[in-house]
């Protein structure tokens, strides 16, 4: 149990550190977070035209559109610009909110690693290679399940950053877990 707790905490920390580096110092996700000098005008237009917080597709489909109305909207939109908007009425960028988000992220990472270790604990004497490959495969599964399937529909501009994040963070975790599982116990 002690090995699992330590393994999950350190593995979660390694993933957390990579995520932090990727989004901050390395700035890997910049293609999806570009700056525009027109941001004040855009935010004013959004505030004036969106009824509430939420996710919006522009152009979008009215909730109860008929099949014919949907077809017409799709034809009119073909070849024209579109946007996916995540609209919030208030920026939650204060220190307390940021700290809470970081704690939640770290705990999520620890839980993911703990779940992976639960699987590894069911294997008879898993080798370093099996643990490393299993960890990288989890990274690929998480990448394919969310960022890539979203990219199929919405063309994420930072899709390569998500792939690198998945491979590097879970490879680091796999190196750690491979070491942890294959070191000799102290007498």
Image: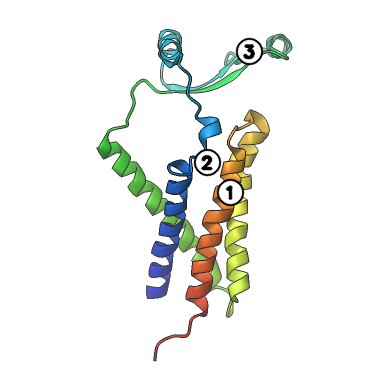
Return the disc, 1 or 2, that comes first in the chain's sequence: 2
Question: Which quadrant would residue 80 be assigned to in this image?
Answer: top right
If the image is split into quadrants, where does the N terminus sit?
bottom left
Horizontal placement of 162 versus 176: left or right? right
The spot of residue 186 in percent (x, y) is 40, 87
Residue 131 in percent (x, y) is at 58, 69
Which residue position holds label 3? 65
Looking at the image, which is closer to me, 155 or 20? 20
Are circles 1 and 2 on residues that touch, CB within 8 Å?
yes
Expressed as whole percent of the image width and height from the top left, the position of residue 174 reads 54, 65
Mark toward the viewer: 3 or 1: 1
Secondary structure of residue under mark 3: loop
Where 178 sits versus 30, above or below? Answer: below
Disc number placed over residue 164 in the picture, else none = 1
Task: Please give the residue where the numbered disc 2 appears in the rendered image.
Answer: 28
Specify which label sits upstream in the sequence, 2 or 3: 2
Residue 104 vertical placement versus 4 (above, below) = above
- Toward the bottom, the furthest residue is 187
Residue mark closest to the camera, 2 vs 3: 2
Q: Is residue 1 visible?
A: no
């Amino acid at each position: 149990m002690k090995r699992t707790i330590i393994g999950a905490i350190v593995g979660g920390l390694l993933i957390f550190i990579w995520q932090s580096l990727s989004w901050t110092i390395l700035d890997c996700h910049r293609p999806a977070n570009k700056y525009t000098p027109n941001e004040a005008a855009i935010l004013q237009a959004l505030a004036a035209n969106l009824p509430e917080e939420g996710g919006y597709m522009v152009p979008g489909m009215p909730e109860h559109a008929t099949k014919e109305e949907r077809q017409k909207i799709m034809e009119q939109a073909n070849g024209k610009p579109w946007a996916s908007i995540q609209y919030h009425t208030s920026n939650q960028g204060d220190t307390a909110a940021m700290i809470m988000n970081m704690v939640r992220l770290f705990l999520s990472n620890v839980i993911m690693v703990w779940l992976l270790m639960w699987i590894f604990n069911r294997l008879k004497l898993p080798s370093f290679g099996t643990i490393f490959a299993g960890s990288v495969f989890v990274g690929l599964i998480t990448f394919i399940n969310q960022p890539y399937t979203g990219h199929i529909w919405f063309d994420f501009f930072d899709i390569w950053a998500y792939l690198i994040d998945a491979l590097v963070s879970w490879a680091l975790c796999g190196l750690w877990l491979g070491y942890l599982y294959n070191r000799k116990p102290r007498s």
